[in-house]
Image (cartoon, helix red, strand yellow):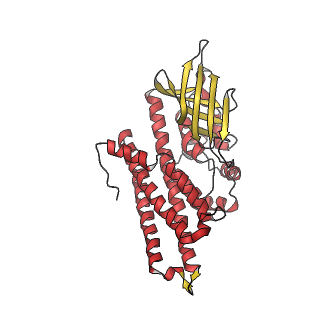
Amino acid sequence: MLQDSIEGILSSTSDADAVWTQLAELGMLGLTISEADDGAGLGLAELLLFAHGFGQAGVSTHYLGAEILAMPLLAAQSSHPAVAGLLADCVAGTRIATLALDDLAPVTATRAAGGGFVISGVKTLVPSGSKAGIIVLSASLDDAPALFVLDTETDGITRVPYEPAASGAGADVVFDAVGVDEAALLAKGDEADRLIADARARGLLAVCADMLGCMEKLLDLTVDYLRTRQQFGQPLASFQVLQHAAVDMYVELETARAMLDYGVRLYDAPQNERAHALDAVKFKLNAAAKTVGESAVQLHGGIGMTMESLTGRLFARLTADRLSFGDSRACLARLVANDASIALS
């Protein structure tokens, strides 16, 4: 039923703002937030179902920044004074929240003489950073990790949207001596570290689900193209070498699906064990996405490289996903540095 609702929404529009409005109207925001806080009280599986659907459709939305990263984190701190009222607005779709974790220039918070904090630095790859009205950001405070929540209209905050500046586009966010009061501090130390680790794990799994949806659609498009495109008086699908290429895509897709299932099962494992397993998951999904994406473009020919073609757009999306929450080199470096081992083939 939930899957049917997702498909119905995505068949009617591809605009991120319109999709967000429909999700809010249908009560499909705040899936993992408790019912006491106006959410649906569901779990990770439902979050990934949406991420998978958006990947299949090639639709850019605010889902990663808001529903996957920021809202569950805010919900975990629902008793905090700074969060009061924010969750209800987010669930209603009237405000968009996002989470900024990656530094372009180190983001630090220092204690102000008159109380509160001064935040400086630059965050990069902020999902929906061009549109979000609420930003939760990580920063270093007293040489320990900390999390702050800010309104993006606060003085000293500048957003640099990525091109094309679509409604769901990310951005770099500059913090130029931004003054905030004590209530803006959500968490510090071990608590902040745990919240950040959980958010990164959700983000990685959501990106992998998006990649899986992209790969499924690319395989369907490619097989359909091979069956209908004629060459030398017969369908391309009749040539054995092209059949083998399509089978290779299918094998990579199904291996990726199994790895994603493994990652979901390990989500509740101890933090270090989970991080190690998710590096393996992302490493394999990256490799599968490269094979499936490049094969789809090659088998389509020139049309597969154009942005007018869904194949080309999905390939571009896969390429971006491969760099998000750990590219192959970073994942492999962490796996090699770890004493444990995981079979990747």
- Residue sitting at x 45%, y 32%: 193
Query: In screen coordinates, is 333 left or right of 5?
Result: left
Which quarter of the figure has residue 183? top right
Relative vertical location of residue 138 with respect to residue 40 in this rendering, above or below: above
Which quarter of the figure has residue 87? top right
Instruction: Decide which of 246, 262 is in the foreground and name it.
Output: 246
- Residue sitting at x 64%, y 61%: 307
- Give the percent coordinates (x, y) of residue 192: 48, 30
Quarter holding the C terminus is bottom left
Relative vertical location of residue 307 with respect to residue 102 in this rendering, above or below: below
Quarter holding the N terminus is bottom right
Instruction: Decide which of 251, 92 is in the foreground and name it.
Output: 251
Instruction: Decide which of 195, 323 is in the foreground and name it.
Output: 323
Instruction: Decide which of 85, 316 is in the foreground and name it.
Output: 316
- Residue sitting at x 65%, y 51%: 23
- Give the percent coordinates (x, y) of residue 294: 51, 63
Query: In screen coordinates, is 249 left or right of 302?
Result: left
